[in-house]
Amino acid sequence: MDDNKVIRQLIRVNLELEGLEVVTAADGAECLDVVHQVRPDVVTLDVVMPRLDGLRTAARLRADPRTHHLPVAIISACTQYEVDTGLDVGVDAFLAKPFEPAELVRLVKQLIERGSGGEGRGGGGGHRGGGGDGDSDGDGDGEGGDDGVADGVPDGVADGVPGGISYGG
């Protein structure tokens, strides 16, 4: 989910090139509707959105028994406060904008694997991803750094490094 059409398209194209099915939404309210209709494997959210922002959307997904298990990634130029708030509401990973398309793909695929493999919250089969940037059932995959996760926070993530990825615990 992203309110920027260009970012949504960037995410969609990069994930579809990897064989993932992508569904997008322009804001949090639309995202919630799409998630309930499509039942994605991963949801990606931007923080700053009209009507319902990404953090409040993530909180609603976690509070709903139908979606509490879905892996959720924030793809945004987050402040430390937004990262902390995201972790508090149960966001699984963060990808800082601007990001490399390969990082997006890596993150989404990793969240899909975690979700279907019983690691973390996710569950569910298939590889339906909601587009990373505007996907209401987005799968924002793209992992930065060297995949090294120390103390539950992957390299270059929570510190706001552009393109960095961080994971919640």
Image (cartoon, helix red, strand yellow):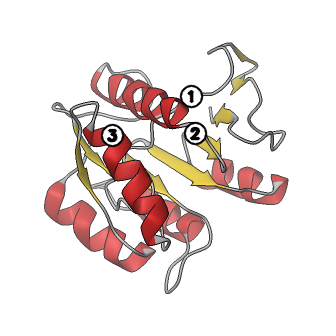
| Distance between mark 1 and mark 3 Cα atoms | 13 Å
In percent of the image, x 78 and y 39: which residue is there? Answer: 158
| Nearer to us in this view, 60 or 134 | 134
At x 26%, y 61%, the residue is 35
- Vertical placement of 106 versus 63: above or below? above
| Residue type of the residue flagged with mark 1 | Glu
Mark 2: which amino acid?
Ala
Labelled disc at residue 93: 2
Whichever of callouts 1 and 3 sits on the residue coming sooner in the sequence is: 3
Left or right, 164 with respect to 19, comes to right
Q: Residue 33 appears at what percent x and percent y? A: 25, 73
Neighbourhood count class around disc 3 (C-alpha, 10 Å): few under 14, some 14–19, many 20 upward: many
Tell me the SS state at disc 2: strand
SS at circle 3: helix
- Is 90 situated left or right of 30 in this image? right
Any mark on residue 15, and which? Answer: 3
